[in-house]
Amino acid sequence: ILLVTAIVAMLTRRLGIPASSGLVVAGLGLALLPGTINIPLTKDLIFDAFLPPLVFEAALYINWSELRKDSAVIVTLATVGVLITAGVTAVGMHYLVKWSWEAAGLFGILVGATDPVSVIATFKEAGVRSRLRLLLEAESLFNDGVAAVAFSAAILWILGEKVTTYDIARTLLTSVFGGIFCGAVITSAILLLAGRTKDHLTEITLTTVAAYGSFLLADRLQLSGVLASLTAGLIVGNTGYLRSIHSRQAVESFWEYAAFVANSFIFVLIGVQMVEQHFTSVASIVPIAILITMVARAAAVYPCCALFAGSTAWVLPRHQHILFWGGLRGALALALALGLPSQLAYREEIIATVFGIVIFSIFVQGLTIKPLLRGLNSVT
């Protein structure tokens, strides 16, 4: 996989296309070669192995003062926006595709949140450095908590468990603030140790413990692992822990490579997994589902941004268009879909349709985002 990744990275850079698209095609090709790859893409693999380095590396570069300044917009998109997207998607799938309310609601939640893996990879490759990148990346990182809690509540409801609004609100708050607390506690302890060394290899090791330790602890406690790793990255990147330029360069180089490897494995394995999907059974559903999710994303982005019209948090119209088109779906939606209980009705249809939407995100939205950024003058 690493050899293929290196070759694809060189080819896609020469061709000027996103590496994620090339990696999915490469994974599809590898899957057609017998005996090449036998690594199943599972929820545990994505969550425990690949998400921590991606989230931590992205958080390292987020400026705390800029995040705080835009926190109202980000929180609105990551909460109200996710619920609107999920609700509109569920209604559309029920009335247009004729799925049951249970299946339509579950599908809406699965695709309601944007995916940090796809968003971070796409905007990093596009070279976006403006406020726009902060808004999109932070939204994709923060909406994990809302999506995960809503997903768990929907599963319990479908399986016949009693779930009240109070239970959902309590679980959401516990997941979000508990995840942040885990990240803060683990990283603070790590920083106490790090202050006793000037060895950059030891510093890299300790940041690895912070990234994975906070994520895994929070996840085991049924809290938000993404927010735990995000908190860890924010603390390391903003507290002056990396005192020397040499230390910062060493740590940032390591995490840039770790994120590159994690990204590469995810997109290659998505390509591999595509071969096993039964797309013929949902061939007529996927185009409708794509249209519904795009309408739902628009119904979330533009009204949420309109709430801040006339204030200092106002999002420029051209940036709103990018927020709409750049709301990609990827590994996170797939991980949740693949983790659906086997006894659920519509399980296979939901998984195949989610795959279809992810393919659309990677090949249509991913390939057109750079031209759109240039056309709207939104790169810098």
Image (tube, rainbow, N blue to C red):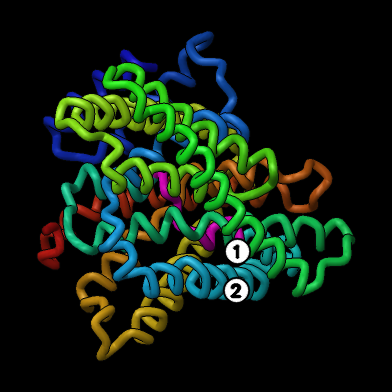
Picture residue at 71% right of the left edge, 45% below the top: 340
Q: Is residue 67 above or below residue 258?
A: below
| Residue highlighted by disc 2 | 87
Q: Earlier in the sequence, mark 2 or mark 1?
A: 2
Check residue 243 for magenta coloring. Answer: no
Estimate how packed mark 1 is, as few (under 14), some (14 to 19) or many (20 or more) residues with alpha carbons within 10 Å.
Answer: many
Q: Visible in this render: residue 225?
A: yes
Q: x%, y% of residue 355?
A: 53, 45
State the residue position of label 1: 108
Pointers 2 and 1 in contact (C-beta within 8 Å): yes
Helix, strand or loop at mark 1: helix
Residue 51 visible at all: no
Identify which residue is drawn at 39% across, 30% down. 207
Q: Amino acid at mark 2?
A: Gly
Q: Position of residue 152 (x, y in %)?
A: 71, 55
Q: CA distance from mark 2 to mark 1?
A: 6 Å
Q: Which quadrant would residue 135 be assigned to in this image?
A: bottom left
Mark sitting on residue 205: none
Q: Which residue ends up furthest to the top in the rendered image?
A: 35
- Quarter of the figure with the C terminus: bottom left
Judge the density around disc 2: few (<14), some (14-19), many (≥20) Cα neighbours within 10 Å.
many
Q: Nearer the viewer, residue 132 or 126?
A: 132
Judge left or right: residue 134 versus residue 159: left
Q: Quadrant of the N terminus?
A: top left
- Identity, as a three-letter code, of the amino acid under mark 1: Gly
Rendered image quadrant of residue 177: bottom right
Q: Is residue 47 above or below residue 38?
A: below
Q: Which residues are magenta?
A: 108-117
Image location (x, y in percent) of residue 123:
26, 49
Query: Percent x, y for residue 234?
Result: 36, 48
Q: Residue at x 28, y 78 (%)?
A: 313
